Image (spheres, rainbow, N blue to C red):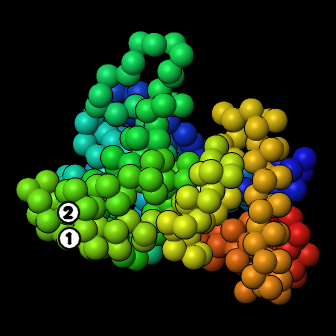
């Protein structure tokens, strides 16, 4: 973090999370231990860390609801992490309705990270799933949440898609205009689909390069792009290059628009401001003075 001028980070447990644990009681116990440990790291370094709570598999909704209550009310979590699918069901599946209702009631931030989906992974070593399949899994989950009206019916939830939204910014118009109003998506016009697609938030993990960034910048609503690193899975040199890219392109964006006065600057929003609005508990710990001092960092 210090090497890349990253002043604070939100911790999360990546795929496969707890889906590999078959015993429901064991998964619930481990989720509690992980979240308590993450909270202890936050408490030791309150201006450096926040955390997304880990849930048991969504195959056990009662346990998930219990952990949501504990994580938010007792531990002060900044949000939760969900995987793109569970046992072949993407996040817009009706079985997850009570989970989304609880998250909506809490105005929760939900970080969606891809995992291996119901399609068997390729056996080709040159095409590993995390590099090739994961972006498509994010898109499938996003489309599922749009078609299942999760985005529209639970508008208090702020959903952050990792890796610049996978392939969604590229695919959204194709899906909207080919499937909108068809038997595939009966309940939405193309315009409705795109309105909902732009309600997502997006992090820049593994995507802070000129092409993906330019596409996402044109697609996403202002205020909906945040920095992300994917450490420790991403290579250190890759993280450095992407962090430098974000700082450079966001500074240039501020100069081009003439917005270099803090909270009104779009580049600063991408580096830091959008995250502070998403995570008010973290912003409160940092305090305005800290925010002002860190304006030139991440």
| Quadrant in the rendering for residue 137 | top left
What is the residue that sits farthest to the left in this orientation? Answer: 183
- The quarter in which the C terminus is drawn is bottom right
Where residue 230 sits: x, y (%)? 65, 43
Which image quadrant is residue 198 in? bottom left
Can residue 62 be seen in the rendering of this structure?
Answer: no
Instruction: Classify residue 43 as left or right of residue 100.
Output: right
Foreground residue among 132 and 64 = 132
Task: Give coordinates of residue 155: x percent, y percent.
Answer: 36, 76
Residue at image point 59% right, 75% down: 223
- Label 2: which secondary element: loop
Q: Is residue 41 left or right of residue 100?
A: right
Is residue 278 visible to the viewer in this orientation of the structure? yes
The residue that disc 2 covers is 180
Q: Which mark is residue 189?
A: 1
C-alpha span from label 1 to label 2: 5 Å
Disc 2 packing (10 Å; few <14; some 14–19; many ≥20): many
> Residue 140: percent from the left, percent from the top?
33, 46
Task: Give the class, few, some or many, for how many residues have Cα within 10 Å of label 1's Cα (few <14, many ≥20).
Answer: some
Q: Are marks 1 and 2 in contact (CB under 8 Å)?
A: yes
Task: Determine whether, in the image, residue 283 is placed left or right of residue 68.
Answer: right
Along the line of sight, which residue is nearer the eye, 175 or 19? 175
Residue lying at 51% horizontally and 13% vertically, measured from the top left: 125
Quarter-of-image position of residue 297: bottom right
Q: Secondary structure at mark 1?
A: loop
Q: Position of residue 6 (x, y in %)?
A: 82, 56
Q: Image point 45% across, 13% down: which residue?
A: 124
Residue occupying the point 44% across, 75% down:
107
């Amino acid at each position: 973090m210090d090497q890349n001028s990253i002043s604070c980070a939100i911790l999360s447990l990546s795929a496969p999370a707890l889906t590999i644990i078959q015993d429901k009681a064991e998964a619930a116990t481990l989720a509690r231990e992980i979240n308590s440990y993450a909270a202890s790291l936050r408490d030791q370094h309150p201006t450096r860390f926040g955390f997304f709570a880990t849930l048991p598999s969504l195959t056990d909704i009662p346990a998930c609801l219990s952990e949501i209550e504990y994580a938010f009310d007792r531990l002060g979590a900044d949000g939760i992490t969900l995987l793109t699918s569970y046992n072949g069901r993407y996040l817009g599946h009706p079985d997850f309705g009570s989970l989304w209702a609880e998250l909506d009631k809490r105005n929760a931030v939900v970080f969606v990270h891809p995992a291996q989906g119901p399609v068997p992974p390729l056996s080709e070593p040159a095409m590993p799933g995390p590099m090739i399949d994961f972006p498509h899994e994010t898109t499938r989950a996003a489309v599922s949440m749009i078609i299942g009206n999760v985005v529209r019916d639970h508008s208090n939830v702020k959903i952050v898609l990792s890796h610049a939204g996978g392939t969604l910014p590229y695919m959204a118009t194709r899906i909207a205009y080919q499937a909108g109003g068809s038997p595939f998506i009966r309940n939405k016009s193309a315009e409705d689909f795109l309105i909902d697609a732009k309600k997502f938030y997006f992090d820049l993990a593994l995507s802070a390069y000129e092409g993906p960034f330019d596409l996402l910048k044109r697609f996403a609503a202002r205020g909906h792009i945040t920095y992300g690193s994917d450490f420790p899975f991403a290579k250190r040199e890759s993280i450095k290059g992407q962090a430098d890219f974000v700082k450079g392109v966001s500074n240039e964006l501020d100069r081009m628009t003439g917005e270099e006065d803090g909270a009104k600057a779009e580049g600063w929003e991408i580096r830091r401001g959008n995250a502070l609005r998403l995570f008010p508990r973290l912003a409160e710990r940092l305090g305005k003075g800290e925010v002002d001092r860190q304006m030139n960092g991440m």
